[in-house]
Each structure stands twice: as C-alpha cells, then as structure tokens.
Amino acid sequence: MIKLIASDMDGTLLDGDGNVPPETYDLIRRLNAVGISFVASSGRRFDTLQEMFALVMNQMDFVASNGAQVVVAGKLVDREVFSHAALRRLKSIVDLFDNLHLAIFDRKITYLLDDEARFERELDKNLPNPVRALELPNPDTSIIKASIYCDDAVMDMAYILERELGEDFVFAPSGRKWIDIMQRGVSKATGISQVMAAHNVKPAEVMAFGDAMNDYEILRMVGTSIAMGNGRSAIKQISTKVIGTNAEHAVQREIAALLAIMGK
C-alpha cells in the first residue's frame, strides 16, 4: 500500500511553463485526507517551493535543494551547508572552461559567479533574487545549493567535473543545459529517507516520480518508481513504470488514478 508520494518538480510535476497545474492542489488535499503523505522533491530552494505550494503548505512535506533542505510538518529538520573550501575548489575548476557558468545559493539569494551577460539573462528568467558576484561570498554565508549552466556538451562536462571534484561532489545533468551539484552523501534520496523516517514509512510503501539524473537515487530506492515520458533514457530504464509527459500533466493523472483505485 502506498503511504507516501514524492515528486520531482521541473520536467515532472510542473507543466511545460514551469507552473503547478491547478488540479495539483486538490490532489494533495485528497491524498492528505486518506493518510498519504505528499512530498515535493526538487533541486529548487525551499523558499521557491513555499511560494508554489502556498495553498497547501500545511498538507505536505519538502525535500528542497536536492536534499540539502528537509522540511517535515512545517519544520526544518535538516540543512546541509557546502564547505567553503570545497566551493573554492569547485570555482577554480569551473573557471577553466568558457562554457561553464556557476551559480550558488543561500536561503534567499542566487550568486551568479560569472560576468557573461547571456548567462545572467538566462538565470534572471528562472531564479529568484540573482546577484552578480565575481568572487565567492564570505565563508560565513551558508551555501545550500550549487548549479552549473552549461552552454554545450553537458554530459562531457559532467564527466570532467566528476573526475576533477568527485571526492567532494556528485554532478547530475538536469535538463539540457544544467548540471546540479550535490555534496557527496547528500541527495534527494537522503532527504526522502528522513521524511520516511518521520512518517514511519518503508521504501516499499513509497511512490516516486522523476525525469532527470538527480532523481536516480530516489527512484532506485523506492518500491514504485515512475519515470516521465520526457525523462532521460537511464531514468526510464531503472523505473518500474513510464508514463506520459509533464506537459500532459501525467503525474496528476497517475495520482488521480491511484485515488480512484482506492475509491477516494
């Protein structure tokens, strides 16, 4: 029996324009009413997810910033902060490549560590409170997330970064232009594990939706793993089921079907 549902956001739960389809809120309420916990599992920061789900904040949990922020029943239960020394090593490698552009995040601000105007415009469209900064912020700034915008050759660059910095970080391509950077030992799966423990839920009782490589660990961990039709090939191959695309609201249809089977 499914007791917890975790869903990625971009390319999965969100529509093609990056918005929450309106029917999602009622589905979350219905899940809550029958005792199924719903978790937004995302590379996005918690403050961004708060805005997206303001209507149902008290009826769901959050694994944000690829597992660096975990919120259960409205309370922050874990926060993983990047080492400043590791960030210096990361920036030194990224600076070697003209096609890589680094963005790092604290709880509220996005620091764009690049002087290329096109990169800044790209981020302005998608990220809250961007600040241009050619150097790392002070060590007392709590950085909880890092991402790299890649002009081209995303898979090649992810391989190079893993070879250079694999002791500190895991690099997961996300979409066609982004590489998510996770601290080694921190992932969506570690975050979901904390939510599961809080609700006394076993992996076999979890359904998870995802589309990209930063969803890999959680999809491998849970009993019911569902890949998006628009997802990466590797994600489809390791999942128990492949559904339609995010543009088709396939996650919402799948949740509605589960509720219908339950007679709810």
Image: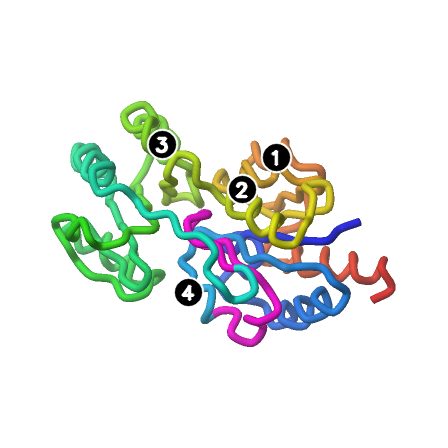
Question: Which tag, 1 or 3, sits closer to the chain's start?
Answer: 3
Q: Quadrant of residue 231?
A: top right
**Residue 78 located left or right of residue 252:** left
Q: Earlier in the sequence, mark 4 or mark 3?
A: 4
> Which stretch appears magenta?
52-71
Amino acid type at image mark 3:
Ala
Q: Which residue is mark 1?
A: 220
Earlier in the chain: of badge 2 and badge 3, it is 3
Q: Which residue is mark 2?
A: 189
Mark positioned earlier in the residue sequence (2 or 1):
2
Query: Residue 46, relative to residue 217: is it above or below?
Result: below
Q: Earlier in the sequence, mark 4 or mark 1?
A: 4
Name which residue type carries label 2: Ala
Is 91 placed above or below 107 here?
above
User: Who comes first in sequence, dot 2 or dot 4?
Assistant: 4
Q: Is residue 239 left or right of residue 99?
A: right
Residue 221's quadrant in the figure? top right
User: Do we see residue 98 in this rendering?
Assistant: no
> Tag 1: residue type?
Arg
* Secondary structure under the numbered disc 1 in the rendered image: helix
Comparing labels 2 and 3, the label whose residue is closer to the camera:
2
Residue 50, how many percent across, how many down? Answer: 46, 68
Whether tag 2 and tag 1 are in contact, CB under 8 A, the answer is yes
Residue bearing the label numbered 4: 48
Location of mark 3 (residue): 158
Kindly report the distance in space between the C-alpha atoms of the residues bearing marks 2 and 4: 20 Å
Q: CA distance from mark 2 to mark 3?
A: 20 Å
Mark 2 to mark 1: distance in Å?
Answer: 9 Å
Mark 3, other Cα within 10 Å: few <14 / some 14–19 / many ≥20 = many
**Depth order, front residue of 229/174:** 174
